């Protein structure tokens, strides 16, 4: 199954994707995670995108589209995938439809207030990328990942100034994709406010899996 996860930052796309991978046996492809690895590795791509990402803005379409095109050409993505954080603009969605047709787009519905609360407490494993929250989804030890023992940190773009910018960017550039995919008849709305387990159940029902 080829899925796109669409929604504002902090809606829980990455958390649900981590659970859905086991269920659907397809890779979780997060453009944000690919960029963060590139930054950590100080690769050419990482050096190019770091300032833009830290400011809460979008990496340019051409760079992002090429990255996803190459990733989707790999063997593990042929039977399906979960695209998390891509597309984020109409040009990205149009480019994607030329090289891969998604079966469904899951729209994570959540008000801005809940997003701010979640991002303020979000922590991430530097090694495996698993998300935690200091109130709702605490790791056993606040600095160590339960899953892999990696270091838990706060993303630079989860700081307050960047979060406001990311929400603005989401409303202006990404939210128009909701209508874009609704018109294609492949959009599924999922209420992203309940607990992770409830969101997983609603997701399974909505997809019939
Ligand atoms: P995420 O982990 O999805 O919240 O992405 C973190 C950051 O990576 C975003 O705020 C953007 O700066 C950048 N990014 C991720 N995906 C895209 C995309 N599809 N287009 C442009 N920038 C992106």
Image: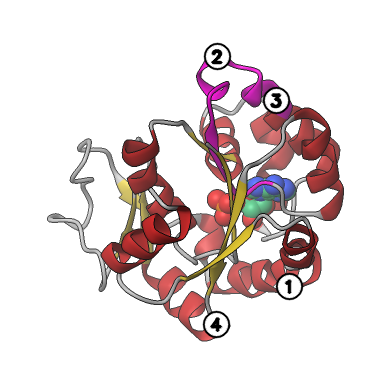
Q: Which mark is residue 44?
A: 3
**Badge 3 or badge 1: first in the primary sequence:** 3
Please name the residue that numbered disc 4 is placed on: 111
- The CA span between labels 2 and 3 is 25 Å
Seen from the viewer's position, the closer of residues 140 and 196 is 196
Q: Is residue 75 magenta?
A: yes
Q: Earlier in the sequence, mark 2 or mark 4?
A: 2
**Cα distance in 3D space between marks 2 and 4:** 37 Å
Question: Which label is found at residue 171?
Answer: 1
User: Would you say the residues marked 4 and 1 are in contact, meaning their CB atoms lie under 8 Å apart?
Assistant: no
Vertical position of residue 83 compared to residue 142: above or below = above
Q: Which residue extends farthest front?
A: 208
| Disc nearest the viewer among 2 and 3 | 2
Q: Earlier in the sequence, mark 4 or mark 1?
A: 4
Q: Which residues are magenta?
A: 69-86
Precedes in sequence: disc 2 or disc 1: 2
| Beta carbon at label 3 within 8 Å of ligand 1 | no
Residue at 66 percent across and 66 percent down: it is: 166
Around disc 1, counting alpha carbons within 10 Å, would you say few (fewer than 14), some (14 to 19), or many (20 or more)?
A: few
Q: Residues within 10 Å of mark 3 (few under 14, many from 20)?
A: few
């Amino acid at each position: 199954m080829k899925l796109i996860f669409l929604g504002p930052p902090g809606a829980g796309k990455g958390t649900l994707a981590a659970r859905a991978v086991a269920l659907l046996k397809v890779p979780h492809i997060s453009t944000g995670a690919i960029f963060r690895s590139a930054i950590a590795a100080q690769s050419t791509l990482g050096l190019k995108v770091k300032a833009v990402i830290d400011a809460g803005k979008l990496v340019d379409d051409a760079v992002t589209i090429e990255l996803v095109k190459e990733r989707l050409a790999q063997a593990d993505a042929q039977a399906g995938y979960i695209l998390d954080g891509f597309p984020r603009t109409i040009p990205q969605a149009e480019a994607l439809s030329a090289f891969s047709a998604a079966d469904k787009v899951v729209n994570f519905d959540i008000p801005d207030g809940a997003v701010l609360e979640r991002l303020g407490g979000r922590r991430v494993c530097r090694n495996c990328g698993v998300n935690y929250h200091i109130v709702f989804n605490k790791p056993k030890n606040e600095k160590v990942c339960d899953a892999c023992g990696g270091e838990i940190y706060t993303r630079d773009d989860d700081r307050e100034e960047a979060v406001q910018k990311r929400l603005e960017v989401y409303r202006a550039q990404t939210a128009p994709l909701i209508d874009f995919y609704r018109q294609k008849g492949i959009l599924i709305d999922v209420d992203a406010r309940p607990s992770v387990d409830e969101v997983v159940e609603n997701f399974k029902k909505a997809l019939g899996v």
